[in-house]
Image (spheres, helix red, strand yellow):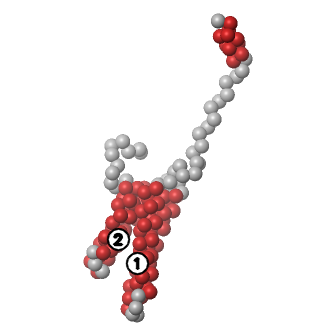
Amino acid sequence: MERQARRGTATAGIPAEPAAPRRTDSPGGNISWTGLIGGVLGFGALVALGVSLAAGAGDSSSWWAIPFLLFSLLFLPAIYVSVKPVEAREFVLKLIVIISLVFSITGSILVGAALLVVLTPCLALLAQAAGFIFQGSSRKS
């Protein structure tokens, strides 16, 4: 009894401190990992394909490297918006997925289905980060 009375009087005179604010700028806290991995995979795959065509034997194959290297630049904004906290992240990722699908389907008609096989994993990851697939009803607004 005496202990409770001392404990009550000891804390009664001390003002309560406000709770510390939560840090929202923690490193790695607002990174879209699926968007980042999808962007890096798409960029890396197309750069590797372009470099292999440019280094190939023959003069005509080096010209085929230019469209692939230009197409790889499309994935750089996906990497940027996945790392930085941007308000329009989903819009940018959706735009990149749509443009990439159009380019890859057109390219697969011209070059072959290998382009779609190479880009399917990165486009699936970008589509998930953009909110196209695997977003249940408990999705945050």
Q: In this view, does 104 lie to the left or right of 23?
A: left
Question: Which residue position is annotated with label 1?
Answer: 49
Amino acid type of the residue tagged 2 in the rendering: Val
- Work out whether 9 lies above or below 49: above
Name the residue at the bottom extreme.
59
- Of residue 130 and residue 119, the one placed in the foreground of this image is 119
Mark 2 residue crowding within 10 angstroms, few (<14) / some (14–19) / many (20+): some
Name the residue at the top extreme.
1
Position in image of residue 12 (x %, y %): 69, 16
Query: Which of the two labelled residues, at mark 2 and mark 1, occupies the earlier sequence position?
Result: 1
Q: Residue 3 carries which label?
A: none
Which residue is pictured at 43% across the width and 76% down the height?
48
Q: Residue 118 carries which label?
A: 2
Which quadrant of the view contains residue 47?
bottom left
Which quadrant of the view contains residue 11?
top right
Quarter of the image that includes the N terminus: top right
Q: In this view, does 36 lie to the left or right of 16?
A: left
Question: In what element is the residue under mark 2?
Answer: helix
Which quadrant of the view contains residue 62?
bottom left
Q: Is residue 92 visible?
A: no
Separation of disc 2 and disc 1 at Cα? Answer: 10 Å
Quarter of the image that includes the C terminus: top left
Position in image of residue 38 (x %, y %): 42, 62
Q: In this view, does 23 lie to the left or right of 69?
A: right
Which residue is pictured at 67% across the width and 24% down the height?
16
Which residue is pictured at 44% across the width and 64% down the height?
39
Which residue is pictured at 54% across the width and 57% down the height?
84
Q: Do the residues labelled 2 and 1 touch (CB within 8 Å)?
A: yes
Question: In what element is the residue under mark 1?
Answer: helix
Q: Is residue 69 visible?
A: yes
